[in-house]
Image (cartoon, rainbow, N blue to C red):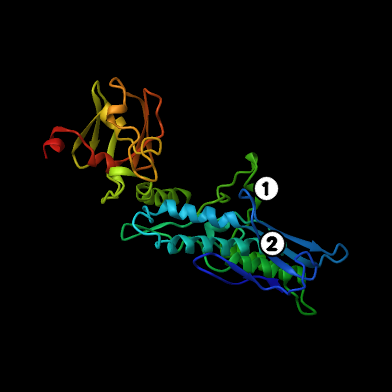
Amino acid sequence: MWAVPEDYSEDFLTFNLVIADDADPMDVRYNVIQWVHRATRGWSYGSSIVDPRTGEILKGHVSLGSLRIRQDFLIAQALMNQPFAETNENYKPMLEMALARIRQLSAHEIGHTLGFAHNFAASTNNNASVMDYPHPKVTLKNKQIDLSNAYAVGIGEWDKITVAYSYSDFKEGVDEEKALKTILEEATQNGYRYITDQDARPNGGAHPYAHLWDNGANAAEELEDVLASNGHEVGGFLVGPYANLEDTEMTGADLSNLDLSENGVYISWNDGHTGFYPYRYLRGNCCCAGCVEEMTGNRRVGEDDVREDVDIVDWMQIGRYAIQFLWSDTHDSGIYPFDLLKKICRCNECVMG
């Protein structure tokens, strides 16, 4: 039987393992999921010991790295809008996402112990397999980042097909070759695909349905979904006076008319407003970690610290929510969300209003 977590403390992520007191995890009689602490995050593994004479799997052994939990917890923390700004108790959404990921990963690695390969096309079939590499599904709920459905629960339909094809024990008299072919034909008729590493990872093996770390049946539509939440996610990285922007809706701008004038930047917004941002003022309001202390929100670089002759060398649009500038003082790490730019506009109307 598998030596699996019996329970866990939601507060401390401590696990009690179900394994006999006198058992050794390396004993071939035990299938084991082991929890490994490493100095750096490494791969998780699912391997088997197989009888070379019969092909029988004698032992399955899965290694899960503890830093995976930490990494996914930090990803969830970054997606939320400063969850610990007022209290340390707001950790459960991040913890639940990290645990959902480790449950999915456990099933993935157990799949490898059973001999199942990656299926990177599963994400195009409603996440039909735990053998894909899943991207967390981040949605918006009441204009807030929602992580409750970040990862699927349980195995998928393709996994059931794989088990049926690999492990079915047909009754005497059944044409096994024909029965196996029927399983694959029905899977194809239902729209399921199988595309593994050889057609996904190599430079010459690219396949439109075999992306790693993606969601959805249509890459373009999924990009729109990701961009729709990006403006909200970036708000969680803003610190200092702009950390609690109330309006996180993406404010459209016609950047084809962005004008780098002698004294500053003019941006034409889709609501008809034309914003103006003096170069030195805009540079001094950068909210990157180099310009604002992340932990305290105290500004490290303000307008008074910027050269008077600073200007913009180049710029690029970030998704549909922000602009990134390359400054003449070589600074280029700041991202300016549209809603931030609307709030710090220095045109006459905004200054007087």
Residue 162 seen in the figure: yes
Q: Residue 185 or 280: which is nearer the viewer? A: 280
Q: Secondary structure at mark 1?
A: helix
* Residue at 34% from the left image edge and 48% from the top image edge: 235
Q: Secondary structure at mark 2?
A: strand
* Residue at 39% from the left image edge and 54% from the top image edge: 80
Quadrant containing the C terminus in the rendered view: top left
Q: Return the x and y of residue 124 as percentages of the image width and height.
A: 53, 56
352 relative position to 25: left or right: left
Q: Residue 90: which quarter of the image? A: bottom left
Q: Return the x and y of residue 62 as percentages of the image width and height.
A: 69, 61
Q: What count of labels does the image hold?
A: 2
Q: Is label 2 in contact with label 1 (beta carbons under 8 Å)?
A: no
The residue singled out by tag 2 in the image is: 62
172 relative position to 141: left or right: right
Q: Residue 149 or 98: which is nearer the viewer? A: 98
Which mark is on residue 222?
none
Q: Amino acid at mark 1?
A: Gln
Q: Return the x and y of residue 69 as percentages of the image width and height.
A: 55, 57
Mark 2 → mark 1, Cα distance in angstroms: 23 Å
**Crowd around label 2: few <14 · some 14–19 · many ≥20 (10 Å):** many
First-in-chain label (2 vs 1): 2
Quadrant containing the N terminus in the rendered view: bottom right
The residue singled out by tag 1 in the image is: 198
Q: Amino acid at mark 2?
A: Val
